Image (cartoon, rainbow, N blue to C red):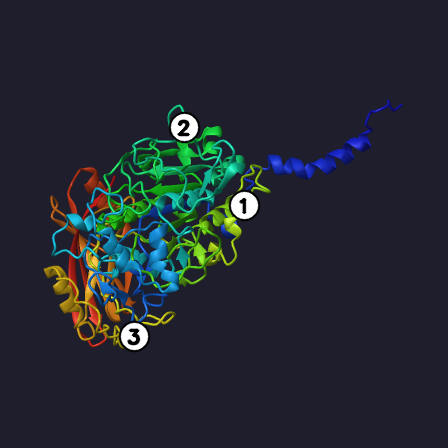
Amino acid sequence: MCLPGAWTGRAWQAAFAAALPLLLLVIVPGARAAPLEGIHKIQHVIVIMQENRSFDSYFGTYPGANGIPAGVCVPDPLHGGCVAPFHDSNDKNYGGPHGHDAFTADLDGGKMDGFVGEAEKGEQCSSTEPTCSPCTEQESSVQCVDPMGYHDAREIPNYWTYAENFVLQDNMYEPNSSWSWPEHLYMVSGWSATCKEWTNPLSCSSAVEGPPNPESTEGKDPYTGPDAISLPWTDVTYLLHKHNVSWGYYIFEGSEPDCESDEVMTCAPVHSGPMTPGIWNPLIDFTDVKEDEQEGNVQSLTHFYTAVEETSECGLPAISWIIPNAKVSEHPAALVSSGQTYVTTLINSIMRSPCWGSSAIFLSWDDWGGFYDHVVPPTIDGEGYGFRVPGMVISPYAKAGYIDHQQLSHDAYLKFIEDDFLEGQRLNPKTDGRPDARPEVREEAPGLGNLESDFDFEQPPRSPLILPPEPAPGPASCPPGSVPHGAAAPAASSPCPYPAPSTPPTAPAQPPASPAATATTSSTATLPLILQLTASTAARQDLRLNHGRVYLMVGCNMACSIYVHGHLNLRRGRQNLRLRSVRTSLVAHRTVGIAVSLSRRNLIIVRRALGKHRSVKASIDVEATGIDGVREGYHVYVVLTWR
């Protein structure tokens, strides 16, 4: 007899058979998730945002990029005539005003000829006023009006090396035609606005200069105190929190990297910390960050290094923004070399960590800083775009030596994050569940490219490229206009095969050069005839972090063959251990990373010696042979540790 609702033995068998595959999925040991594919191989996005450099000021003579054209000469209203682009060997630069008014003047209706005049206007007042230039405090022998100056691998060898080995973007624009405060708002929210009611996101409207500054000229912070306001529109962390995606916004403690006025070229530094609102730190002022109780995600850079130095697994959140202090920001008048050292240290730490294999590093500069750029920016709405800024993609899946010419802005970072982690959800008030009054969805702006094209997810993950934080100068580039846009690197036998344009006769004489600059100029004049080898390495390297390798950077100004060899000196035992030699070939003007290593036996010996606190020094010889048979040598020493 079968009771109502009871199952027969046959029914039990059928049910068990149907459920068996599900049970096996649960209980079979060693079952693995499907491998990640395409963009989802990137599990950690790190945005490193530096300050105030135009594309042409850093990569205007980079081979193959859309750089400074021949015959450029920008009018000089103060002295008459015009100023042609010139190589600037100075480590300290000054740029010019870089608010919306300065943008309009620099653009000059598309003529792109207001840069010198704007820099000179900023010089005509005391440096304590908000629109002044740092030049008022300098000696007359220093070239202060320098917006037409450009750098190359002689001053920024690591930046050029990253470009040569990963991806350089020569059509990357600041998202807004103004200064740092609104740019950082765009970086995290895709909008810059001011609001009639600071609790109502539907009352907001676009503001090219941004909402009230976190530190006003009266010294009052509108985002703190009993009458505090907050930014009510939606930023990307709202979506990240909604999808359980981790994030961190890392502040390098120190004085802030820009001033509290859109036209300022110099101002008194304001001390910053992880919880101090400022133009570089907007997330702490957003309503949704407070409502989600995620203020603690805005934290000191110390926490970044703690996370990235974990050895068992990657300790970084899925999304990281890293913001500098004034000293390392490259914001005039901070030293270019200090910024390059800081950025190199950040990238090295990521490359040495378990995070590297699943990371994408987006390196860029927030605005043009008053420096010259020759490309008229596209107009997509009333706020942008601004002028071009340098952009790079560094990742084990990044294409090698690739120049990305597609139209981009910092909005593309949000687009990539949303495609990778948020299933393509945009900061769209119609679909994101938190309406605001933004007029456009910036991630869907007409013509905006896709950063996925900078990757090759089918290639095997690339090895780290550890660079010395304080590198030796790289080789000189060809003068502006010598290598046309899209052309390959110069031929081996002639570093600059295309005739350089002559300086227009109306250009004023360049400022007095320093002895170092004079020496550089005289040496570059003989580049087509004399082999020039550059080699640099960090003075101290850790063998454990480097996986038993010693890294150095090597480049030639013409095609050359390279032979690297060396040994370690264990002082107490007076024992020399040979490094494995490396032979390779280089093309002209290309700096590459080379790793020399120890045999397994020698590495064990060195590790034991270091465990007993013995001093271990590597002596490395780099030999280059040019196409004409001329040889050049370079000798470097490296102190090795194991921590």
The answer, for residue 240, to whether it is visible in the render is: yes
Q: CA distance from mark 1 to mark 2?
A: 29 Å
Q: Secondary structure at mark 2?
A: loop
State the residue position of label 2.
228
State the residue position of label 1.
426
- Image quadrant containing the C terminus: top left
- Dividing the picture into quarters, in which one does residue 89 lie? bottom left
User: Is 66 drawn above or below residue 51 in the view shown?
Assistant: below
User: Is 258 drawn above or below residue 528 in the view shown?
Assistant: above
Give me the disc on residue 491: 3
- Dividing the picture into quarters, in which one does residue 61 lie? bottom left
How many neighbours does mark 3 have within 10 angstroms: few (below 14), some (14-19), or many (20 or more)? some
Callout in the foreground (2, 3): 2
* Among numbered discs 2 and 3, the one appearing first in the sequence: 2
**Three-letter residue code for mark 2:** Ala
* Among numbered discs 1 and 3, the one appearing first in the sequence: 1
- Image quadrant containing the N terminus: top right
The answer, for residue 552, to whether it is visible in the render is: no
User: Is 1 drawn above or below residue 429 in the view shown?
Assistant: above
Q: CA distance from mark 2 to mark 3?
A: 61 Å
Q: Is residue 96 left or right of residue 26?
A: left
Q: Secondary structure at mark 1?
A: loop
